[in-house]
Amino acid sequence: MMEEIWGQACVELEKSVGPNNFNHWIKPLRLTALEDGVARFASPTRFVSDWVNRHFADDIMGQLNRVGPSSIERLRFEVVPSAPANGRARPGAARPERDDAAHATPSAATVRPKVRPDLCAPLDPRYTFGNFVVGKPNELAHAAARRVAEGGPVGFNPLFLYGGVGLGKTHLMHAIAHDYQSRHPSAQVLYLSAEQFMYRFVQALRESSIMDFKSMFRNVNMLMVDDVQFIAGKDSTQEEFFHTFNALVDQGKQIVISADRAPAEIKGLEERIKSRLSCGLIVDLHPTTYELRLGILQSKTEAFRRKDPEVRIGDGVLEFLAHRISTNVRVLEGALQRLFAHASLLRREITLEVAQECLADILRTNDRKVSIDDIQRKVAEHYNIRLADMIGPKRSRNVARPRQIAMYLSKQMTSRSLPDIGRRFGGRDHTTIMHGVRKIEELSVEDNGLAEDIAMLKRLLQA
């Protein structure tokens, strides 16, 4: 009886939470009882129980109330490591499994450890290729991510994605994992942050289970590590990461890495790791353009209106947002979410006046404060150079001049001291900043084109 009810609920749960979340968190559970408004489950670990209770309790109760004989108001879990999950193999138990991504085919007797649900970070079901808006700043990263998600020989390993906050690195990482697993259901994909990698490594050292750690991480088809700059300066973790990286590459397994800057510019990262990371394809996600921001807003608007077709948005509102909120896509999406919540709850059309009133705090923040990060992004975008070059060592004219312009604007438009500005430009001395500022002051008097560029950049930053 319990297996039948749970089986019916699981069919819909997999659709609502997505295959990855379902396989990692819900599939290992076993429904044991429905009584007094409580659904009782056997769970493989306390970590899985807590995560499911925090993130999927409403979904589970909704489906059980749909197919079950009584109303369920809460969930209870009992940790039973050896309990079967839906009549299948025990969570975490070893079993033979075909390696879809490896070049070598293991024999039928090969036994590989299954990735435990508590080892992999959850994937956001919203972050798919279908929801990713492609524009000139991210088209190469999108194409490379699509290629990796197909599986098979790729021609580059690892894929290294880097860029500033809110430019889409994590979205692409999740999209790769979703698409790859849909194409290769039996493959093992492990996605986690560099911080989680370090935490698991330290835990394995503490529990004297380092061989289990090595076996688990080196027997996946695809390893994805987010924010790899976190392990910089952490010698033991870098050592293990290096050997894990080598073992997977030698087996032909795909690795996908993300960071906030290029490998060569991550201070505290060992040279051998920088060299290894640089052997693959390194893709910079550039700052968003006005056109890309507008495309993102239009895509999000269509999604919102599918949920609530009665919400109306006036002419010029999306264009206004794309102009005024230019530094961070997450802030941009949050502003749009707030507008739609406002319109849905109060049943008001989103006009330009409503947008200005509802988003007054966000707009004031952008008006009041221009940051050095904003200046660096805008100058890099204007001169079509990499954001990382602003803090890097390159001295070629096409990089050095925009860098000096950014230094000049930082001195003119922020209250930061010269030493502070120097630290934000790769740790440069304050005298270097002073020289750059004076150089631009002198050139702007003689060069009308440069003076016009500076005036336009100031207007864009103040818009």
Image (tube, helix red, strand yellow):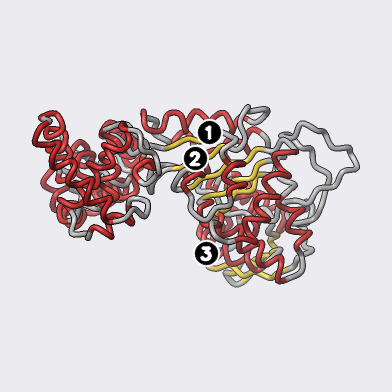
What amino acid is labelled 2 in the image?
A: Leu
Up-down relation of residue 218 to residue 296 (above or below)? below
- Name which of mark 2 and mark 3 comes first in the sequence: 3
Residue ID at (31%, 32%): 397
Give yes or no for contact between labels 1 and 3 (Cβ–Cβ under 8 Å): no
**Can you identify the residue that label 1 sits on?**
145
**Is 135 in front, or is 157?**
157
User: Residue 387: x percent and y percent?
Assistant: 36, 41
- Name which of mark 1 and mark 3 comes first in the sequence: 3
Give the SS element for disc 1: helix
CA gap between label 2 and label 3 equals 31 Å
CA gap between label 2 and label 1 equals 9 Å
**Can you identify the residue that label 2 sits on?**
161
**Is 99 in front, or is 70?**
99
Give the SS element for disc 3: helix
Crowd class of label 3 (few under 14; some 14 to 19; many from 20; radius 10 Å): few
Give the number of the mark in front: 1 or 3.
Answer: 1
What amino acid is labelled 1 in the image?
A: Ala
User: Residue 106: x percent and y percent?
Assistant: 84, 37
Q: In which quarter of the image is the N terminus?
A: bottom right
Residue ID at (65%, 41%): 222
Is residue 95 in view?
A: yes
Q: Residue furthest right?
A: 109
Give yes or no for contact between labels 2 and 1 (Cβ–Cβ under 8 Å): yes
- Name which of mark 2 and mark 1 comes first in the sequence: 1
**Can you identify the residue that label 3 sits on?**
54
Q: In this view, does 432 lie to the left or right of 148?
A: left
Up-down relation of residue 14 to residue 419 (above or below)? above
